């Protein structure tokens, strides 16, 4: 497979040159010569014995023999065929120094190593300066990431989703502890914790991480009973109230089990499933996402002279093993996130090196979570206490977005969300989604209900009201005799994912008094998600485009007023309206007043 050529500059005598004459002007005529390098790359994950057998079955007899005695940590096997001899040699030498296995037959290189070994090989190929080195490094890196199937969309969290492939997700810290390093004691009482959680939702948080045991340096462990007494009341209250996923920061299987039963959606384990042998089974049984974090030692002793052979490769190998541990227990591959553990058993120089090479952790094929918020490395740089470290946190988050981080765990939700959105726009070209909501009401004062619903839609986090149609009075459909409905459509721009957007609509309906007792019956307010960009979603709780939207005159008429050319199901809104057979009666009522207020 041809790759972009390495370009050399050749002087008239055929000699490669870059010198300047005595007057500092070049004395040669430059001729661009492309050096073409051809190769193919295949990589495979082999975390379990069964996976290794499958990989070996795809290789020929000689290659299988070469990998007969794989070391336990060599979870990633690669086969490089072709011409990049010098580049492959540079990669192979670095991999072998890290303890990986390399076998060469002609133009084929067979490599088996841990992710730490592969990362050192990638770095060596990139820095080699030989033809094909950078391209080989890039393509090996891409293959390893692809093996893990890194999420490109939303990660399911039970009845919620985590938008890890959509944009940078914001995880808000909610410590219900007396001794956390930054906010210990502030939210220890359940009512204070609930108030802060509601505040974070309004600020645009994507997931709330609830912790009942401090993991600051030097912290003493607490019992499962004490941790549950702090965490459960908050989880139980929030699970029925907020529309964002709830994460529980714990390494204890008992706490995880009880919290998940109470309505939590994911687990954040600072031990990467090491401290409690039952944790992996709990996560697997509930089929929830889990964060696997690196830590050297325990919170009590982690900052006592932490030492690494090579900090980034060492952490990669740790996370590599943790992923294998999770998969062996039955955890779904696409429900694993990894966290390099900033500040957990690291010096200032270790933390800075990790942050410089954050893109390395994408090799795991898992969404990468980073928690730099108010950490001591920022304080060491700026000589500031925790509450004055916002700008340092924001700088770290922006650079993390550039490196491909998927989730940032922070205390200052609103400011960091804004930081991340600007970085997302620059790095990923991210823009909020264009969506259309259909609203209807026929109980009480329907127009007043519509006005209030539109007002509340305008206050949804990360959402801007673009336009509101006129109100139309429409004959009800279905078998139930009732008053005519008043309907309209609003256009919004939103950062919320479709599932969250539907949940927000249901929340507004409930707050305005809707009770779902009769299909096709009268209602105080009804809010349906009609279109969400060009996305297609088919879940029991969220179907986009709305499956009946192209057949409903009370949706199409106000939608045509706002966006006649928007398309779905092969037609524009106007075309859908024009193709409707005669049926439901619809009358123009007038504009919805006071929407600007």
Image (spheres, grey):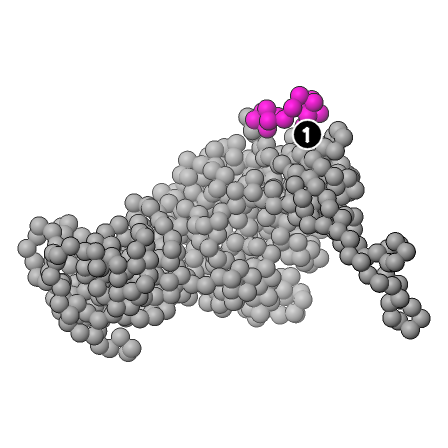
Q: Position of residue 527 (x, y in %)?
A: 24, 59
Where's residue 543, x and y in %? Answer: 30, 49
Asked whether 60 falls inside the magenta stretch, the response is yes
Magenta region, residue range: 53-70
Q: Rate crowding at label 1 as few (under 14), some (14 to 19) or many (20 or more) other CA atoms within 10 Å.
A: some
Res. 351 image quadrant: bottom right
Kindly identify which residue carries mark 1.
Answer: 71
In-image side of 561 versus 215 (left or right) = left
Q: Is residue 192 visible from the viewing direction of this image? A: no
Q: Magenta residues: mostly which secondary structure?
A: helix
Towards the viewer: 453 or 300: 453
Residue displayed at 18% across by 52% down: 516
Task: Tell me if residue 473 comes above or below residue 60 in the rendering.
Answer: below
| Helix, strand or loop for disc 1 | loop
Between 510 and 135, the one nearer to me in the picture? 135
- Can residue 367 be spotted in the picture? yes
* Residue 588, quarter of picture: bottom left
Please tell me which residue is depicted at 37% across the width and 62% down the height of the picture.
434
**Residue sticking out furthest to the left:** 481
Q: Residue 532: give x, y in percent of width and height.
A: 35, 57
| Above or below, comparing residue 518 to residue 64 in the picture | below
For residue 382, side relative to residue 447 (left or right):
right
* Residue at 29% over, 45% down: 540
Q: Quadrant of the image for the N terminus?
A: top right
Nearest the viewer among 392 and 457 is: 457
Of the 4 image quadrants, the one containing the C terminus is bottom left
Q: Is residue 476 left or right of residue 245?
A: left
């Amino acid at each position: 497979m041809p790759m972009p050529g390495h370009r050399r500059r050749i002087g008239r005598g055929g000699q490669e040159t870059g010198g300047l004459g005595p007057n500092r002007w070049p004395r040669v005529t430059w001729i661009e010569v492309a050096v073409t390098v051809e190769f193919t790359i295949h990589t495979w994950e082999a975390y379990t014995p069964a996976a290794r057998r499958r990989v070996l079955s795809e290789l020929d007899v000689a290659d299988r023999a070469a990998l007969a005695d794989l070391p336990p940590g060599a979870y990633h096997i690669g086969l490089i065929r072709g011409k990049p001899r010098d580049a492959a040699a540079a990669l192979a030498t670095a991999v072998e120094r890290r303890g990986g296995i390399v076998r060469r037959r002609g133009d084929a290189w067979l490599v088996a190593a841990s992710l730490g070994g592969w990362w050192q090989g990638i770095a060596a190929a990139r820095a080699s300066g030989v033809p094909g080195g950078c391209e080989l490094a890039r393509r090996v890196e891409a293959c390893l990431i692809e093996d893990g199937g890194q999420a490109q969309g939303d990660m399911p969290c039970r009845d919620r989703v985590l938008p890890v492939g959509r944009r940078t997700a914001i995880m808000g810290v909610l410590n219900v502890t007396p001794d956390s390093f930054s906010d210990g004691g502030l939210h220890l009482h359940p009512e204070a914790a609930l108030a802060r959680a509601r505040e974070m939702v309004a600020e645009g948080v994507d997931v709330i991480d609830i912790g009942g045991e401090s993991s600051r340096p030097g912290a003493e462990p607490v019992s499962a009973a004490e941790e549950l007494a702090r965490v459960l009341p908050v989880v139980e209250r929030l699970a029925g109230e907020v529309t964002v996923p709830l994460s529980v920061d714990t390494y204890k299987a008992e706490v995880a089990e009880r919290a998940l039963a109470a309505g939590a959606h994911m687990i954040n384990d600072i031990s990467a499933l090491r401290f409690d042998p039952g944790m992996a089974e709990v996560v697997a049984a509930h089929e929830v996402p889990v964060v696997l974090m690196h830590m050297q030692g325990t919170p009590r002793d982690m900052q006592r002279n932490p030492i690494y052979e090579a900090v980034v490769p060492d952490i990669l190998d740790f996370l590599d093993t943790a992923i294998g541990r999770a998969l062996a227990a039955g955890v779904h591959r696409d429900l694993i996130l990894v966290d390099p553990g900033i500040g957990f058993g690291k010096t200032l120089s270790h933390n800075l090196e990790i942050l410089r090479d954050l893109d390395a952790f994408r090799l795991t094929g898992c969404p990468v979570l980073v928690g730099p918020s108010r950490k001591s490395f920022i304080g060491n740089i700026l000589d500031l206490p925790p509450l004055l470290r916002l700008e340092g946190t924001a700088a770290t988050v922006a650079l993390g977005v550039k490196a491909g981080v998927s989730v940032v765990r922070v205390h200052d939700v609103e400011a960091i969300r804004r930081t991340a959105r600007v970085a997302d726009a620059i790095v990923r070209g991210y823009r909020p989604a264009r969506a259309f909501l259909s609203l209807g009401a026929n109980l009480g004062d329907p127009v007043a209900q519509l006005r209030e619903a539109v007002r509340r839609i305008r206050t949804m986090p990360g959402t801007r009201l673009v336009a509101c149609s006129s109100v139309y009075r429409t004959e009800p459909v279905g078998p139930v005799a009732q008053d005519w409905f008043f309907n309209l459509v609003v256009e919004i721009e939103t950062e919320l994912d479709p599932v969250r957007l539907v949940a927000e609509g249901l929340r507004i309906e409930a707050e305005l008094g809707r009770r779902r007792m009769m299909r096709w019956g009268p209602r105080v307010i009804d809010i349906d998600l009609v279109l969400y960009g060009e996305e297609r979603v088919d879940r029991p709780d969220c179907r986009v485009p709305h499956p009946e939207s192209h057949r409903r005159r009370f949706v199409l008429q106000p939608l045509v007023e706002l966006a006649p050319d928007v398309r779905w199901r092969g037609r524009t809104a106007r075309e859908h309206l024009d193709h409707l057979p005669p049926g439901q009666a619809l009358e123009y009522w007038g504009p919805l007043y006071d929407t600007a207020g």
